[in-house]
Image: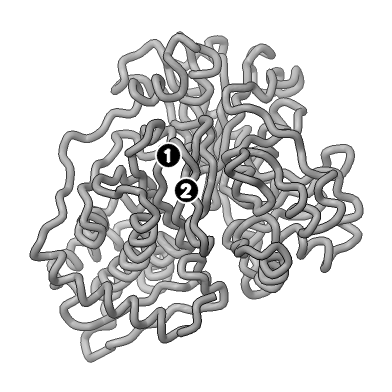
Amino acid sequence: MTLTIGIDVGTQGVKGVILDGARAPGEAILARAHAPLSLIEGLPPGAAEQSPEVWWSEAKGVIARLLASPGVDAAAVRGIGVSGQQHGSVFLDGEGRVLRPAKLWCDTSTAEWAERISARVGRRIPVGFTASKIAWLASREPANWGATATVLLPHDFINLRLTGRAVMEAGDASGTGCFDPVRRAWDLEVAAAIHPELPGRLPPLIAPDEAVGPITPAVAAELGLSPTVLVSCGGGDNMMSAIGAGATRAGVVVMSLGTSATVFSRCDAPVIDPEGLIAPFCSSDGAWLPLLCTMNCTNVVEELRAAFAPGDPTALERWTEEAGEIPAGGDGLTFIPFLQGERVPDRPDATGILTGIRPGLLRPARLLRAALEGVTANIALGVERLRALGVEVAEVRLVGGGSRNPLWRTLVADLLGARVLLPVEQESAALGGALQALALVAPEVGGVDGAAARFVPLHPEGIEPDPARRRALAPVLERHRSAIEALDPTPP
C-alpha cells in the first residue's frame, strides 16, 4: 500500500480522503471524512472571518477519522497534500502564533482598500484578494500589523502546522494581488505599494514538485503517523480541484459549484485579462490557470432553504423535482443573486434583486428555479469573457456541492452551450491534494498529470446542451445582463 491523504480546508468545512496508489481507480479512495465550519458571528456588514486554529483543529480531527477507517493502515501513509480556500489572510507573529481571525475571500469590508491599491498600482486588484486585507489590517489594526512577521494563506497555515515551515507556492500565491503570474514570482513593487513593510513579511516560494517537508515529530506522534510522511506544496482549492478533476493538461475546463462558483482551465501560457475580471492564476503543477470566480453560488440556495425549510434535509430535493417541471424562465421571474456583493461583475456593494414578481410566484420551487437560473446566468456571462480571451469552453467537468443537483447540471449545459461531464469523485480539491502528494512520494506514477490520468474517472453519461432549452433560456440571460447594467451603467 502507498497511501496519501488529501485535506481541503474550505469555507463551509474541512474534507479529507485517503488514496491508495496501488489500487484500481474505482477502488482507490479508501476513506472520506468531513467536519463543518462556520463563519464568526456578530461581525460588521461585509465582514467574513474564521479562526485559523479552528481550521487546524478540525483538520487534525478529519485526519484522525480517516486513519481510524476500516482497511486503513496508518503505517502505509507516505504523503499529505493540503488544499485551502483562496485569499484568506493569516497573520502570524515571530513565534508562529495567530494574531487575529483570518479575513476570507468573501469578505467585502475591505473594498475601500482594494480601490486604493488598484489606483496606486494602475490595475484592478479585486476586493476578494489578500492584498486589501493586508492594507485593511495595517490601517485599522496597526498593533496587529506591527506584530506580524509572516502573512500566509489558509493552506500554507495548515502546511506550517504540519511541518513547522512557512512557505507558499505559485498557485495560491497568485491570488494575493502582489504576485507576478507571468514570472511566477513575487511582485515586490506591488507588495510595497500595498504596504512598505509587506515585502519583508512574504514567505519564500517553493516549486510545485517540492515538498514543504516531513511532518514534525510532535504531529507524527499526535496523529499516529510516521515522521517520514512528506507534505506536498498543496495549493488553493481551485488549483487542487483542477488536479482532482483531471485538468492537468491544456483543454480541460472545470466548473466548481460551491459557496462561490469558479470556472478554470489549465493553460500552457499565461492568460491576462486587461480589465482584471478573469484572474491570471498560476496552477499548482507548474502551468497557468485563468479563472472566473463569482461570489454567489450554493450560498443562495442555502439562503432559500434556511428561509422556507430550516432543518428539513429533503426540502431541496423536493423543490428541485418541482422546479424541473417549470418552463425555463417562462414567467419572467428574475433573481439577481448578489447576496454577498459580487466579484464578476465587479460590484462588491451590490445586493440581491428579485423582479417580475406576480401572484403565485413566491413559492419555494419557483424561487429555487429563479435562483439557479440567476446564478448560472451570471456564470455564463463570465464564461463569455473567458472565451473572448481565447479559452475554449466546449466541455465542462462539473464538481462541487451544486453539481449534485440534476436541474443545475442541465442549466449549466444549456446556458453555457457546453457538454457537461461529472467526475466520479466530487470532492475534487481533497482528491487533488492526495494526487499531488502521490506524485511527490511515488514519482513512478508520472507526476501530477500521470496520477490524475489514472485516478480521476468520469461518469460515462454526459449532459448535452439542448437547442430548444437554450432558446427558452436566452431571455433569462438578457434580463440578467440588463439588470447588471442598471445597477451601475459605468464599468468599474
Instruction: Give the image quarter of residue 83.
Output: top right
Q: Amino acid at mark 1?
A: Cys
Give coordinates of residue 296: x percent, y percent.
45, 64
Question: Circle 1 — which element?
Answer: loop
Q: Is residue 427 left or right of residue 285?
A: left
Give coordinates of residue 456: x percent, y percent.
33, 28
Query: Can you see residue 345?
Result: yes
The mark found on residue 271 in the picture is 2
Question: Circle 2 — which element?
Answer: loop
Q: Nearer the viewer, residue 43 or 188?
A: 188
For the N terminus, the quadrant is top left
Residue at point 62%, 71% (across, down): 46
Instruction: Give the image quarter of residue 57.
Output: top right
Give coordinates of residue 185: x percent, y percent.
67, 39
Q: Are the two marked residues, 1 and 2, in contact with CB atoms closer than 8 angstroms?
A: yes
Local packing at callout 2 (Cα closer than 10 Å; few below 14, some 14-19, many 20+) is many
Q: Nearer the viewer, residue 301 or 272?
A: 272
Local packing at callout 1 (Cα closer than 10 Å; few below 14, some 14-19, many 20+) is many
128 versus 401 height, above or below:
below
Q: Nearer the viewer, residue 7 or 202?
A: 202
Q: Is residue 44 left or right of residue 465?
A: right
Residue of label 1? 267
Give coordinates of residue 76: x percent, y percent.
53, 10
Residue at point 48%, 72% (across, down): 339
Q: Amino acid at mark 2?
A: Val
Q: Is residue 111 left or right of residue 249?
A: right
